[in-house]
Amino acid sequence: MILYTVKPSERGLWCILYMSTTLADGLQLGSAIKQARDAARAEHLDSGLATRVEMHGADAIVPLANYQKSQDIWTGATA
């Protein structure tokens, strides 16, 4: 499973991590979510591997997208 994570960064903005590597930082939340979903979808389409996007907060992990081998669209948040 390939994991993209949207996490809070310093100054109240957000960052995107690919596995444990920072891809982008200093983003507004909506932009961070969109960029992470776009990257995960592209990775899934290119590799065919299961890919997931999560938002990590202080107290919770929220699934934002899940791309699996049998589908090429995100399944959406479960919250």
Image (cartoon, rainbow, N blue to C red):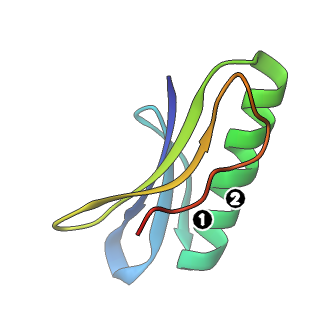
Residue appearing at x 63%, y 53% in the figure: 36
Could you tell me which secondary element the residue under label 1 belongs to? helix
Residue 17's x, y, as percent? 48, 45
Disc 2 from disc 1: Cα separation: 6 Å
Residue appearing at x 72%, y 44% in the figure: 39
Residue appearing at x 64%, y 29% in the figure: 68
Name the one closer to the observer, 76 or 18: 76
Residue 35, disc: 2
Q: Is residue 68 above or below residue 77?
A: above
- 65 lies left or right of 59: right
Residue 27's x, y, as percent? 57, 72
Residue 78, disc: none
Q: Is residue 19 above or below residue 60?
A: above
Determine which residue is flagged by label 1.
Answer: 33
- 10 lies left or right of 50: left
Mark 1 crowdedness (10 Å alpha carbons): few <14, some 14-19, many ≥20: many
Outermost residue, left side: 59
Residue appearing at x 54%, y 39% in the figure: 52
Mark 2 crowdedness (10 Å alpha carbons): few <14, some 14-19, many ≥20: some
Are discs 2 and 1 less than 8 Å apart at CB? yes
Amino acid type at mark 2: Gln
Name the one closer to the observer, 70 or 56: 70
Amino acid type at mark 1: Ile
Could you tell me which secondary element the residue under label 2 belongs to? helix
Residue 65's x, y, as percent? 58, 51
- 18 lies left or right of 49: left
